[in-house]
Image (cartoon, rainbow, N blue to C red):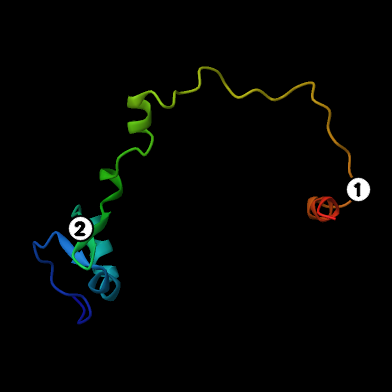
Amino acid sequence: MTPQQPPRTDKSQVGVRELRDHLNSYVEDAGNGHSTVVTVRGKPVARLVPIDAAPDPYEELRRRGAITEPTRPKSRQIGRKRIKVKGSVSDLVKEQRR
Protein backbone atom coordinates (compact mmCIF):
# COMPACT_ATOMS: atom_id res chain seq x y z
CA MET A 1 0.00 0.00 0.00
CA THR A 2 1.07 3.56 -0.53
CA PRO A 3 1.83 5.76 2.50
CA GLN A 4 -1.45 7.69 2.05
CA GLN A 5 -3.67 4.62 2.27
CA PRO A 6 -4.29 3.27 5.76
CA PRO A 7 -4.28 -0.50 6.13
CA ARG A 8 -7.73 -2.09 5.97
CA THR A 9 -9.27 -2.55 9.39
CA ASP A 10 -12.48 -4.35 10.23
CA LYS A 11 -13.99 -0.96 11.04
CA SER A 12 -17.32 -0.74 9.25
CA GLN A 13 -17.82 2.99 9.99
CA VAL A 14 -15.72 5.93 8.90
CA GLY A 15 -16.00 9.64 9.53
CA VAL A 16 -16.48 11.87 6.53
CA ARG A 17 -13.09 13.57 7.06
CA GLU A 18 -11.20 10.26 7.08
CA LEU A 19 -13.21 9.10 4.06
CA ARG A 20 -12.25 12.24 2.17
CA ASP A 21 -8.59 11.89 3.14
CA HIS A 22 -8.41 8.23 2.08
CA LEU A 23 -11.19 7.99 -0.52
CA ASN A 24 -9.22 5.82 -2.96
CA SER A 25 -8.66 3.21 -0.27
CA TYR A 26 -12.33 3.03 0.70
CA VAL A 27 -13.47 2.88 -2.93
CA GLU A 28 -11.00 0.05 -3.50
CA ASP A 29 -12.40 -1.72 -0.42
CA ALA A 30 -15.92 -1.38 -1.84
CA GLY A 31 -14.66 -2.90 -5.08
CA ASN A 32 -13.34 -5.82 -3.02
CA GLY A 33 -16.76 -6.43 -1.45
CA HIS A 34 -16.53 -4.40 1.79
CA SER A 35 -19.32 -2.07 2.91
CA THR A 36 -18.62 1.09 4.91
CA VAL A 37 -21.03 3.37 6.76
CA VAL A 38 -20.11 7.06 6.50
CA THR A 39 -20.74 9.20 9.58
CA VAL A 40 -20.92 12.93 10.25
CA ARG A 41 -20.24 13.79 13.89
CA GLY A 42 -20.86 10.16 14.79
CA LYS A 43 -24.25 9.97 13.08
CA PRO A 44 -24.58 7.51 10.15
CA VAL A 45 -25.55 9.40 6.98
CA ALA A 46 -24.51 7.24 4.02
CA ARG A 47 -23.28 3.81 3.01
CA LEU A 48 -20.50 2.98 0.57
CA VAL A 49 -21.25 -0.48 -0.85
CA PRO A 50 -20.06 -2.61 -3.75
CA ILE A 51 -22.13 -1.91 -6.86
CA ASP A 52 -23.46 -5.48 -6.95
CA ALA A 53 -24.73 -5.12 -3.37
CA ALA A 54 -26.65 -1.92 -4.04
CA PRO A 55 -30.40 -2.58 -3.99
CA ASP A 56 -32.64 -1.74 -6.91
CA PRO A 57 -33.90 1.78 -6.12
CA TYR A 58 -37.36 0.94 -7.51
CA GLU A 59 -37.83 -2.40 -5.73
CA GLU A 60 -39.39 -0.90 -2.58
CA LEU A 61 -41.78 1.21 -4.71
CA ARG A 62 -42.80 -1.85 -6.74
CA ARG A 63 -43.36 -3.87 -3.56
CA ARG A 64 -45.65 -1.17 -2.13
CA GLY A 65 -47.53 -0.89 -5.42
CA ALA A 66 -46.56 2.76 -5.88
CA ILE A 67 -45.19 2.01 -9.36
CA THR A 68 -45.74 -0.76 -11.89
CA GLU A 69 -43.77 -1.99 -14.87
CA PRO A 70 -45.06 -0.89 -18.29
CA THR A 71 -47.26 -3.47 -20.01
CA ARG A 72 -46.58 -2.27 -23.56
CA PRO A 73 -43.81 -0.46 -25.39
CA LYS A 74 -43.77 3.32 -25.43
CA SER A 75 -45.91 4.68 -28.25
CA ARG A 76 -44.31 6.71 -31.00
CA GLN A 77 -46.99 9.42 -30.73
CA ILE A 78 -48.14 9.00 -34.32
CA GLY A 79 -50.58 11.61 -35.56
CA ARG A 80 -49.38 14.53 -33.48
CA LYS A 81 -48.58 17.67 -35.36
CA ARG A 82 -45.04 18.92 -35.21
CA ILE A 83 -44.56 22.55 -34.36
CA LYS A 84 -42.47 24.40 -36.91
CA VAL A 85 -40.38 27.20 -35.48
CA LYS A 86 -37.65 29.53 -36.56
CA GLY A 87 -34.67 29.75 -34.26
CA SER A 88 -33.60 27.72 -31.27
CA VAL A 89 -35.54 26.53 -28.25
CA SER A 90 -33.69 29.01 -26.04
CA ASP A 91 -34.88 31.80 -28.36
CA LEU A 92 -38.47 30.60 -27.93
CA VAL A 93 -38.13 30.54 -24.15
CA LYS A 94 -36.61 34.01 -24.16
CA GLU A 95 -39.51 35.24 -26.31
CA GLN A 96 -42.13 33.76 -23.96
CA ARG A 97 -40.51 35.32 -20.90
CA ARG A 98 -41.10 38.83 -22.25
Please name the residue shown 23% across and 73% down the image: 18
Answer with the quarter of the image where residue 28 lies. Answer: bottom left
Quadrant housing the C terminus:
bottom right
- Please give the residue where the numbered disc 1 appears in the rendered image: 86
Q: In the rendered structure, find residue 36 and report the number of the disc placed on it.
A: 2
Q: Secondary structure at mark 1?
A: loop
- Quadrant of the rendered image containing residue 74: top right
Task: Identify the residue at image location x=16%, y=61%.
Answer: 13
Question: Camera-side residue: 66 or 26?
Answer: 66
Residue 94: quarter of image: bottom right
Q: Position of residue 68 (x, y in %)?
A: 44, 23
Closer-to-camera residue (60/6) = 60
What is the quadrant of the N terminus in the image?
A: bottom left
Image: 5 above or below 86: below
Res 25 label: none
Above/below status of 51 relative to 65: below
Q: Is residue 93 shown left or right of residue 3?
A: right
Residue contact at pointers 2 and 1, CB within 8 angstroms: no
Of helix, strand and loop, which one carries label 2?
Answer: strand
Which residue is rendered at x = 75% and y = 22% of the image? 78
Q: What amino acid is at disc 2?
A: Thr
